[in-house]
Image: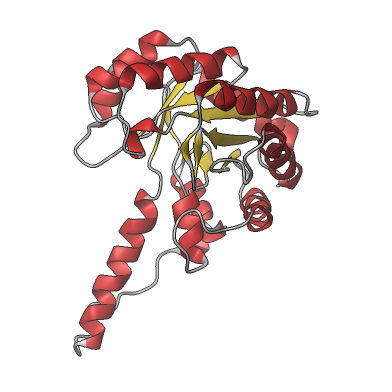
Amino acid sequence: MHDPQRKGEAFRALHAGEPFVIPNPWDAGSARVLEALGFKAVASTSSGFAFTHGRLDGNVTLDQVVRHAEELDRAIDLPVSIDLEHGYGREPERAAHAIERVAKAGAVGASIEDNDPSQGIYEISFAVDRIAAAAQTAHALAFPFTLTARAENHIRGHPDLDDTIARLQAFEAAGADVLFAPGLRTGAEIRRVCEAVSKPVNVLALRGMSMSEILEAGAQRISVGGGLTWIAVNAMAGAARSILAGDLSVLESGPPLEEWFA
């Protein structure tokens, strides 16, 4: 299923067509289920993938993420985009290197954020330099590669919409193909972002938001982050608690894997 040219073209076409949902699997099995259910592309979730290693978000290595990208690409016939967090290094060349690594593994898209896990939000000019380096590498590849630039203000304790918009506009000018500000919660906030930029905007769906509100505000792509992972984990933990208490009625027959994995 490794065909970056075809997958890269398909991913680009999705961003030029009708708005779409890009779900976030946490492993190859969940990716195959999402493909069988009819989704057209997937994006990894850093928090969900970290969970598969028994770790909190931000505690996996680039080498592990590259292997994850390869596993997802080989498991499904859909375009795969990878959450590269801050690029696994501060300097612009580290962000570019991360793009190169996952592209070689089979990804046809990736996101880079403007937050350092230890130092917080990058100063805007430095954040732009990082996106510019990542974009230069992404667009020099032999196949279409879609770079998403993330402005992290709203999930890092700095919900300044004006600053977020300024960052996204600067990332667009630096070469980003998709713009993303996770943590926007209202149609008004999403609309302001979408009207301020010309590139497609990804919106993270959160509890309490509606699909219609997000789409009417102008989003092109909707993701769910670790949402599907936590639905699965909470269901498993709830059933395990019942079993621990002696209730086996929660056990169910297996899902139709033969159909989904055909």
- Left or right of residue 6, residue 260 in this image: left
Count of numbered circles in the view: 0
Image vertical order of residue 111 relative to residue 214, above or below: below
Image location (x, y in percent) of residue 47: 45, 53
Q: Nearer the viewer, residue 54 or 228?
A: 54
Q: How is the image coloured?
A: secondary structure
Residue 65 visible to the viewer:
yes
Q: Nearer the viewer, residue 100 or 33?
A: 100
Image location (x, y in percent) of residue 30: 48, 56
Image point 72% across, 39% down: which residue?
Answer: 103
Image point 24% across, 87% down: which residue?
Answer: 244
Image location (x, y in percent) of residue 198: 48, 9
Location of residue 157 (image quadrant)? top left
Image point 49% across, 50% down: which residue?
Answer: 46
**Which residue ends up furthest to the bottom in the rendered image?**
246
Image location (x, y in percent) of residue 208: 19, 38
- Left or right of residue 246, residue 235 in this image: right
